[in-house]
Image (cartoon, rainbow, N blue to C red):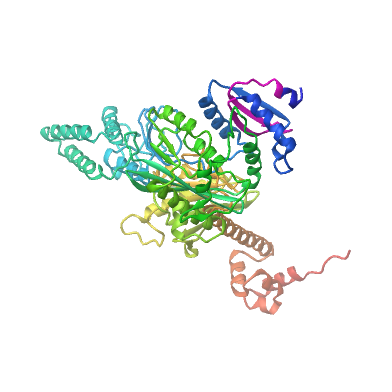
């Protein structure tokens, strides 16, 4: 059955349609109230369209469809299909990260607390999202310090011989070692943390106060003091803590955009309690190709579903072509901002547990009301999805548009970002608890396991600190084993640093751990480094690896969700620069070791030349090449005459005739 015949068999019910190319790949996903009328209109329009608008239909050789009960289900299904299939002709949300949540692993025997950006149905409790992003790390740090719940990667389903450093600095109850705590005490700490994260401060204060008084009556003064400190902390941070909840009426998200030269920048302002607390940026560089499908989509509106991704109304269109102080945007007949925001809002908010009550956008689109109704049904409250035309709300949209223009300039006009901006972006991308001040990167180098060496390079305060570079000769590994080599080198490095933290140490090495340890390699090298750190009792150190070919960054503890950065990202450029420098330094040391090996084997093969004699010759002449070119008399000034003659004869013996 050819495509035209298949279209005649499509139902007239609501649903989603998927266009496929000759390779069977889904190249476009759309929704419709009437599937048959919608899909048929593509061919009617494509037959009259020019070459540009016909690209989608020239590639499409097949169409599949899925029927649903109503338009709301079609919206949700379209969003899921776009996220799963990533069709080339759909607008895709490239930056699909969310703001951080605090995760409490209630399904574990001894729950832990983590900061995460992904919500999973794994039995854990998630709290958030947090604005700004670093607030989640401060909350997690508070839970470590006050409630002593860990976030380490240690397996708590079995006991261990000794506790890690976190227990000794009083940031963990020590459930990994038998006898340090009891299941009842740990459950009580988890309940306290839940009350704090749920925002039930009054109930938490009552419980802490009662337990503090009971401990004091039993003369358990150390326990009472700890409970008193928890009460003080809850009082101090009660107003600072900011978790988005459904009861906040003045929460809003505000969008603005700037389009120019086929590229688009969108800014999203998060307003909480009437204040702008954070900003998010989105960019698209390949809009010319996407606009072909948008133009065709806009032109194929039917009476049943007028302009599904159609142009905005006349009043909205006027406002959508301007930003800030009524500054006009460059006109483009194929650019359809309504289609952009329709796709963006669906991917941003559908399936999210929290949606603000108000979402302000600069342009209208046909399924705006249907999307607002769907979001309201999912979060069980009314969601206002508005296109303000005047007043304070319109001023907020214009402000977001002005910032979008600045984002466009910084992104597409290649302005060099500041050092702090790169640090903030790196901390955000790799989920670091603080801005990275010092990064140490390791690499292994060898040829078929021979002369295996490692390098350590240091990025500190915005530049490479060559004085802090270190070389390692791998001592305990035989043959080709990059994982064991990495484990040995990382263990040696940080065992020495931990030793420098002891009183009386005179070592010139730093006594504190770096902000980030970066490993040149994949998951195997990453886990080898993590094993070495765990042997030293270091369980909360930020650790990541970068794979050479894929340029994918794996963050330890979150390996199933690798960080894929845009090729133009300054964060990726920084990571690549540090990785390449460690690779260069490792190769240089490896070549030096090979040269020494070759030099040693050449001289030591001469009768009468031992290790001490070789050392005297190299120290006097400087290199093997100079020894080769030296006269017998010059050699005799360093070694005995008979040995000098043997050396000279070795390097000047006649070559056999061919």
On the picture, is 134 further left or further right than 401? left
Would you identify the image quadrant in which residue 483 lies? top right
Q: Is residue 318 above or below residue 606?
A: above
Q: Is residue 24 magenta?
A: yes
Q: Is residue 642 magenta?
A: no
Q: Position of residue 366 (x, y in %)?
A: 53, 35
Would you identify the image quadrant in which residue 183 lies? top left
Q: Position of residue 425 (x, y in %)?
A: 47, 52
Given residues 476 and 346, the one toward you in this image is: 346
Given residues 293 and 446, the one toward you in this image is: 293
Would you identify the image quadrant in which residue 37 lies? top right
Q: In this orientation, does residue 313 appear?
A: yes
Q: Is residue 478 above or below residue 249?
A: below
- Assign the N terminus to one quadrant of the image: top right
Q: Which residues are magenta?
A: 7-33
Q: Position of residue 34 (x, y in %)?
A: 61, 24
- Looking at the image, the residue that sits furthest to the left is 217
């Amino acid at each position: 059955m050819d495509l035209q015949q298949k279209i005649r068999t499509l139902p007239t019910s609501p649903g989603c349609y998927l266009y496929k190319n000759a390779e069977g790949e889904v190249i476009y996903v759309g929704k419709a109230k009437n599937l048959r009328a919608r899909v048929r209109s593509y061919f009617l329009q494509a037959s009259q369209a020019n070459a540009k608008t016909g690209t989608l239909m020239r590639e499409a050789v097949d169409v599949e469809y899925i029927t649903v009960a109503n338009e709301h289900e079609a919206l949700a299904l379209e969003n899921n299909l776009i996220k799963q299939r990533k069709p080339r002709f759909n607008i895709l949300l490239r930056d699909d990260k969310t703001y951080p949540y605090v995760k409490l692993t209630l399904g574990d025997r001894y729950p832990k607390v983590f900061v995460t950006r992904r919500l999973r149905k794994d039995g854990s409790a998630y709290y958030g999202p947090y604005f700004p992003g670093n607030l989640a790390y401060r909350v997690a740090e508070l839970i470590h310090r006050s409630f002593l719940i860990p976030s380490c990667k240690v397996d708590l389903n079995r006991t261990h011989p000794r506790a890690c450093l976190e227990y000794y600095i009083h940031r963990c109850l020590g459930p990994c070692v038998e006898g340090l705590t009891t299941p009842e005490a740990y459950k009580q700490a988890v309940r306290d943390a839940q009350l704090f994260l749920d925002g039930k401060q009054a109930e938490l204060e009552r419980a802490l106060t009662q337990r503090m008084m009971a401990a004091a009556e039993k003369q358990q003064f150390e326990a009472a003091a700890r409970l008193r400190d928890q009460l003080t902390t809850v009082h101090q941070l009660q107003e600072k803590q900011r978790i988005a909840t459904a009861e906040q009426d003045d929460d809003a998200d505000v969008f603005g955009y700037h389009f120019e030269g086929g590229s688009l920048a969108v800014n999203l302002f998060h307003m909480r309690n009437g204040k702008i607390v954070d900003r998010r940026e989105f960019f698209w560089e390949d809009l010319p190709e996407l606009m072909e499908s948008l133009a065709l989509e806009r032109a194929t509106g039917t009476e049943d579903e007028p302009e599904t991704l159609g142009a905005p109304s006349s009043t909205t269109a006027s406002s959508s072509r301007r930003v800030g102080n009524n500054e006009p945007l460059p006109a483009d007949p194929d650019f359809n901002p309504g289609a952009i925001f329709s796709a963006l809002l669906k991917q941003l908010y559908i399936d999210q547990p929290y949606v603000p009550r108000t979402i302000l956008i600069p342009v209208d689109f046909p399924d705006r009301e249907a999307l607002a109704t769907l979001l309201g049904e999912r979060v069980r409250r009314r969601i206002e999805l508005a296109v303000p035309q005047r007043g304070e709300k319109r001023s907020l949209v214009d402000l977001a548009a002005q910032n979008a223009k600045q984002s466009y300039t910084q992104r597409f006009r290649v302005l060099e970002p500041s050092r702090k901006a790169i640090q903030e972006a790196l901390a955000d991308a790799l989920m670091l608890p603080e801005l990275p001040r010092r990064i140490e990167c390791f690499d292994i180098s060898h040829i078929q396991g021979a002369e295996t060496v490692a390098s350590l390079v240091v990025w500190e305060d915005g530049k490479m600190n060559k004085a802090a570079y270190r070389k390692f000769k791998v001592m305990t590994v035989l043959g080709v084993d990059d994982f064991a080599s990495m484990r040995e080198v990382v263990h040696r490095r940080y065992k020495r640093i931990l030793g420098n933290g002891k009183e009386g140490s005179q070592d010139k090495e730093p006594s504190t751990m770096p902000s980030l340890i970066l490993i040149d390699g994949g998951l195997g090298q990453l886990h080898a480094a993590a094993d070495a750190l765990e042997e030293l009792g270091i369980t909360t150190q930020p650790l990541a690896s970068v794979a050479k070919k894929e340029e994918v960054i794996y963050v330890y503890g979150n390996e199933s969700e690798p960080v894929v950065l845009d090729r133009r990202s300054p964060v990726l450029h920084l990571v690549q620069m540090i990785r390449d420098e460690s690779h260069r330094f490792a190769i240089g040391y490896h070549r030096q070791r090979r040269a020494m090996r070759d030099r040693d084997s050449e001289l030591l093969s001469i009768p009468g030349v031992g290790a001490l004699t070789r050392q005297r010759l190299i120290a006097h002449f400087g290199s093997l090449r100079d020894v080769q070119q030296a006269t017998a008399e010059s050699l005799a000034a360093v070694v005995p005459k008979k040995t000098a003659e043997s050396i000279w004869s070795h390097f000047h013996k006649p070559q056999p005739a061919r």
